[in-house]
Amino acid sequence: MSRSPALLGSALSAALLLAACGDQPSPTPSGTAPAPADASAHDAAPPNATPANATPANTTPDSGASASDATASSGNETADAGGGATEVTSFDHGDPGVLPPGTGHGVPDPTIWGPGIRFPIKDGPAFANSQVYGHGGGSGPAGTGQCDAANFSYPWHDNFCETRAQPNGLCIGNLGHQGQDIRASTCHPGVHPVVAVADGTVTHIGSFSLFLTTPDGSRTYRYLHMSHLAVHEGESVSRGQVIGMVDHVYPPHNATTTHLHFEIKAPVTESGHTVITFVPPYASLVDAYGRMLAGTP
Ligand SMILES: [Zn+2]
């Protein structure tokens, strides 16, 4: 199965737009910075043009094609290398692309875009869910705070394509979130270590972001909202090395809940065109977390 030409065109054009506009968070807390990944909950417009029940054939990036294309464009890396024989402990989680009602329409991409990554929060439990639509978030339930137990409980939910204003070529309507929000075991800022998910180099540190690029350049893992950064730009890091703490750093007013926003950027190739774009991290995180629970992170 291959992605439909219409979706492909829109996905690629959105991705190219990303490249053209530049999507890296500003290194300074300037008011002119582009909208950061967690900034837009309040002004996110629902993608009205998109039917809620759009057929998978027209809306789902084909995982097989994506995986093989990523492989083709990034050398010998395989997109499903993270599975294999490694033991994975099951836990209560929704499927890739399945979002809680009222938060948007996901795309069910099971591709493990971050093959074999270490789970980014050092210790469990941890909870993948939406910071914006969760308790204490800008579009969350009224009258509750971010420390509500619901934020720190299973099941996990994908929020890569939740309703946001950020360009996302792999989501319906080319808009969405650009990563996955993850809570640590508690809502306390600055106490839960975050680790490198892979060997690599710290290629960017902004006012609230840190980018880690793999040695072959095929993946960039992006971490947002950390404090206590333990590495510097240009530094080589090892998989599992502590790089900072889960926090709510988000200049100028730290208007986000305490969580880790985690992104993967990877090359996606269709019809000879390769773009580096945001890809869904959820399946990779499920796999990595299952391995961590099994004692083999
Ligand atoms: Zn986020």
Image (cartoon, rainbow, N blue to C red):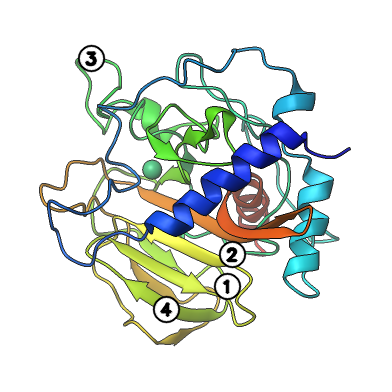
Assign a secondary structure to mark 4. strand
Report, in whole angstroms, how far the alpha carbon at label 3 lies from the one at label 4: 38 Å
- Residue at 35% of width from left, 35% of height from top? 131
Q: Residues within 10 Å of mark 1 (few under 14, many from 20)?
A: many
Q: Amino acid at mark 2?
A: Arg
Where residue 234 appears, x then y in whole percent?
39, 86
Report x, y in % for residue 188: 24, 48
Quadrant of the rendered image holding ligand 1? top left
Of residues 199 and 24, which is closer to you in this image? Answer: 24
**Residue position marked by numbered label 1 in the rendering:** 198
Give, as a three-letter code, the residue at label 4: Val
As helix, strand or loop, the secondary structure at mark 2 comes to loop
The mark closer to the camera, 4 or 1, is 4
Determine contact: label 2, label 1, CB under 8 Å: yes
Q: Nearer the viewer, residue 213 or 122?
A: 213
Q: In the image, 110: left or right of 172?
A: right
Q: Quadrant of residue 193?
A: bottom left
Element under disc 3:
loop
Does label 3 or label 1 sit earlier along the sequence? 3
Q: Give the residue number, with chain letter if any, for mark 2.
A: 118
User: Which image quarter holds the C terminus?
Assistant: bottom right
How far apart marks 2 and 3 lie (CA) works out to 35 Å
Q: Mark on residue 202?
A: 4
Q: Are marks 3 and 4 in contact (CB under 8 Å)?
A: no
**Amino acid type assigned to the residue bearing label 3 in the image:** Ala
Q: Which residue in the structure is indicated by mark 3?
A: 142
